[in-house]
Image (tube, grey):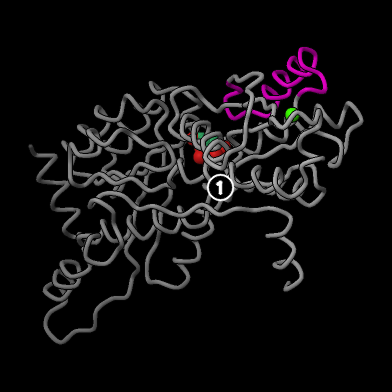
Amino acid sequence: MTRNIKSCFTRCLTKGLCAALALGLLAGCGARRTQDPRTLRIGVAVYLQSDTFISTLVQELERQAQEREQTQNIKINLNVVDGHGSQITQTEQIDRFIALDYDVLCVNIVDRTSAALLIDKAKEADIPLIFFNREPVAEDIQRWDSVYYVGARAEQSGLLQGQILLDCWLDDRERADKNGDGVLQYVMLEGEPGHQDAMLRTEYAVRTLLDAGVEVEKLASNTANWDRAQASARVTQWVEEFGDSIEAVISNNDDMALGAIDVFRQMGMDGETMPLVVGVDATAPALEAVRTGELKGTVRNDAQGIAQSMLDLSLTLADGQDPAETMELTDGQYIWRPYEQVTLKDLEPQEAAA
Ligand code: GAL
Ligand code: CA
C-alpha cells in the first residue's frame, strides 16, 4: 500500500503539468522554471538478444531514443535485459524493474502462456506494460487496460511471402517447376513451435498458393527455431532424402532461409540453380542475398516502425495521457505496423534513386 502511494506520487510528479506546478510553487510565483529534462525509465526485456531480428529492433530503439533526447527535452533511460530464452530469468528481470519503479515496461515475452502473470504484477504496481513482437493471447491483453501490444500481423507476412513464390511460379514456370510435373514441391522451415508468427506464416504462405490455384506438395516440414545453423542441419537432411525434388524452401524467417542457402551454396549451386528460397524480416544479410538472387524475396518486418510506436506509446503513457487520444490504436490496445514485400524488383528502384 505504502509502495503504491509512493509510486503514484512519483508518477504524478513525472507528469509535465504536475512537475511544472510543483516547481512553480517551490520557486515562488513569477520565478523562471528550470529547464532540466525529466528522465523516463523504460525497462525493455527481450526473449533472446542474439536473435537477429530482435537485436535489430533493440538497436533501433536505442538509436531512436537518443534521437528523441536530442530533439525533445527529455532523458530516456533504456535498460535492455536479455532473458536468454528463459521465462524464469525474464520474470525475475521484470520483478526487478517493478521494484525499481520503472515508468514503463516493454516485454518481448519468452513464453506467451506466462503473460497473465506478468500483467498481474504490472497492474499491482500500476506500471503500464507494452508487449512487442511476441503476442500474448487477446484474453490476457484484456486483463488490464494499461496493457498494449505493438507488432505486425503474422497472417500478412505469410500472405506476402506466398505472393512472392506465386510470382516466381507464374513468371518463370520452367525455372520454378524443376521436374515439370505442374506441382510445386516444397519444404517448410518453421520458427519456434507455438509462436504466432511461425504458425500463421506457415499457414498463410501455403494458403496463398492454393488460393491462386497452384498445386503444391509438402515434402517435409520442421522447426529450426528461427536459427540459421539449425536450418542448415534440417536442409542437409532433406537434401539427402529428397535430392533434386525440392523446388522451394519456404522459411518462416530470413536467418533460417540463409541457413538453407548456406547448404545449397556448399553444394555448388547459385541463385539460378538452387530451389526457390523465401524468408521474412528483411535483415541486412537477407537483403544482400536478395541482391545476389539466392533469396527470391523476403518480407520487411518493420523494426524501425515497431520501435517508433513503442517509444511514442511509452512517452504518452509516462505523461499520464490516454494513448487513444493521440495514437491510432486497434481495439484500444493494439498498434499494428504493416509488412512489406521485398524482392529484387522492389530493391532496384530504391537503389537507382539512391
Ligand atoms: C519474428 C521474426 C523472427 C524472430 C521472432 C522472435 O517476428 O520474424 O526472425 O525474430 O520474431 O520472436
Ligand atoms: Ca514440380
In the image, residue 16 sits, relative to residue 266, either above or below, namely: below
Residue 296: which quarter of the image?
top right
In the image, residue 171 sits, relative to residue 22, either above or below, namely: above
Label count reads: 1
Residue 91: which quarter of the image?
top left
> Considering depth in this image, is 345 or 263 the residue closer to the camera?
345
What is the magenta segment's predominant secondary structure? helix
> Considering depth in this image, is 32 or 264 the residue closer to the camera?
264
**Residue sitting at 40 percent across and 71 percent down?**
72
Q: Where is ligand 2, by quadrant?
A: top right
Quadrant of the rendering where the C terminus is positioned: bottom right
> Considering depth in this image, is 310 or 197 the residue closer to the camera?
197
**Residue sitting at 75 percent across and 25 percent down?**
246
Q: Which residues are magenta?
A: 223-245
Residue 54 visible in the shown view: no
**Residue 9 placement, left or right of 325:** left
Q: Is mark 1 within 8 Å of ligand 1?
A: no
Residue 191 in percent (x, y) is at 55, 28
Of the residues shown, which amino acid type is indicated by label 1?
A: Leu
In the image, residue 193 sits, relative to residue 277, either above or below, namely: above
**Residue 196 placement, left or right of 95:** right
**Residue sitting at 50 percent across and 37 percent down?**
204
Residue 281: which quarter of the image?
top right
Residue position for label 1:
160
Q: Is residue 39 magenta?
A: no
